[in-house]
Image (cartoon, rainbow, N blue to C red):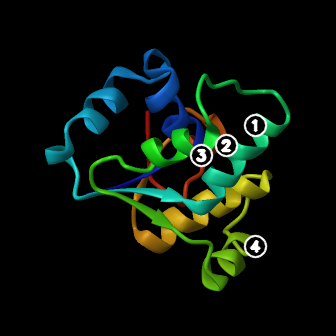
C-alpha cells in the first residue's frame, strides 16, 4: 500500500510527533507496513511558506531540516507534473477549496495512494482514501 503524507503530517512527524494519531504514528514508524510513502512537492513549498510567514518555527537551518525530513525510509517526492496540475482543477465536486489540498488530493488519486491527514475536508472527500 502507498500512503501520501499531507503537509501537516510530514511536518508533525519531524517536529511534533505527539500531534499525530496513534494509528498514523505507528504506520509511519514501521516501514514494513507500507510499500511507499509519498510527499507532494507542494508540501515542501507549503512548509517554506509557513516559515516565511512566521507560522512555523524550527531550531535549525531550513535546508538542513528539509534534507533530514526528505530522508524518511521509502519516501518518494512526487513532482507537480502537468497531469497532476490539470487533474487538481477538475476533481469531482465538491472538492477541497484550498489549491494545495487539491494538488495533494490529485496526487493521491494519480498515485492510487491513501492520504494520511487530520484535515476533515480531505477525510470526508468521497473520491480519495484517507486515514487518521
User: Residue at horizontal 33%, vertical 28%?
Assistant: 25
Please state which of the two labelled residues, at mark 3 or mark 4, is closer to the viewer: 3
Q: Residue at label 3?
A: 63
Q: Specify which label sits upstream in the sequence, 4 or 1.
A: 1
Instruction: Say few, some or many: other residues with alpha carbon within 10 Å of mark 4 (under 14 / 14 to 19 / 20 or more).
Output: few
Q: Residue at label 2?
A: 47
Q: In 3D space, how far apart are the residues under numbered discs 1 and 2 (Cα atoms)?
A: 5 Å
Q: In 3D space, how far apart are the residues under numbered discs 2 and 4 (Cα atoms)?
A: 22 Å
User: Residue at horizontal 85%, vertical 34%?
Assistant: 53
Q: Specify which label sits upstream in the sequence, 1 or 3.
A: 1
Q: In 3D space, how far apart are the residues under numbered discs 2 and 3 (Cα atoms)?
A: 11 Å
Give how far across and how far down residue 132 sits, in percent. Answer: 43, 33
Q: Describe the element under mark 3 as helix, strand or loop.
A: helix
User: Residue at horizontal 58%, vertical 36%?
Assistant: 8
List the single residue furthest toward the top: 18
Are dots 3 and 4 in contact, CB under 8 Å?
no
Are dots 1 and 2 in contact, CB under 8 Å?
yes
> Would residue 39 be found to the left or right of residue 72 on screen?
right
Instruction: Say few, some or many: other residues with alpha carbon within 10 Å of mark 3 (under 14 / 14 to 19 / 20 or more).
Output: few
The tally of labels here is: 4
Regarding residue 79, the answer to whether it shows in the image is yes
Q: Residue at label 1?
A: 50
Give how far across and how far down residue 52 sits, in percent. Answer: 82, 39
Amino acid at each position: 500500500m502507498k500512503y501520501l503524507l499531507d503537509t501537516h503530517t510530514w511536518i508533525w512527524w519531524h517536529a511534533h510527533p505527539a500531534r499525530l494519531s496513534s494509528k498514523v504514528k505507528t504506520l509511519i514508524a514501521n516501514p514494513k507496513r507500507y510499500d511507499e510513502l509519498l510527499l507532494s512537492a507542494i508540501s515542501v513549498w507549503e512548509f517554506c511558506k509557513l516559515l516565511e510567514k512566521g507560522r512555523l518555527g524550527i531550531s535549525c537551518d531550513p535546508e538542513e531540516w528539509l534534507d533530514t525530513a526528505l530522508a524518511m525510509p521509502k519516501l518518494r517526492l512526487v513532482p507537480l507534473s502537468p497531469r497532476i496540475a490539470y487533474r487538481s482543477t477538475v476533481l469531482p465536486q465538491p472538492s477541497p477549496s484550498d489549491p494545495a489540498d487539491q494538488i495533494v488530493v490529485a496526487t493521491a488519486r494519480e498515485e492510487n495512494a491513501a492520504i494520511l491527514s487530520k484535515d476533515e475536508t480531505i477525510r470526508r472527500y468521497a473520491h480519495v482514501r484517507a486515514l487518521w
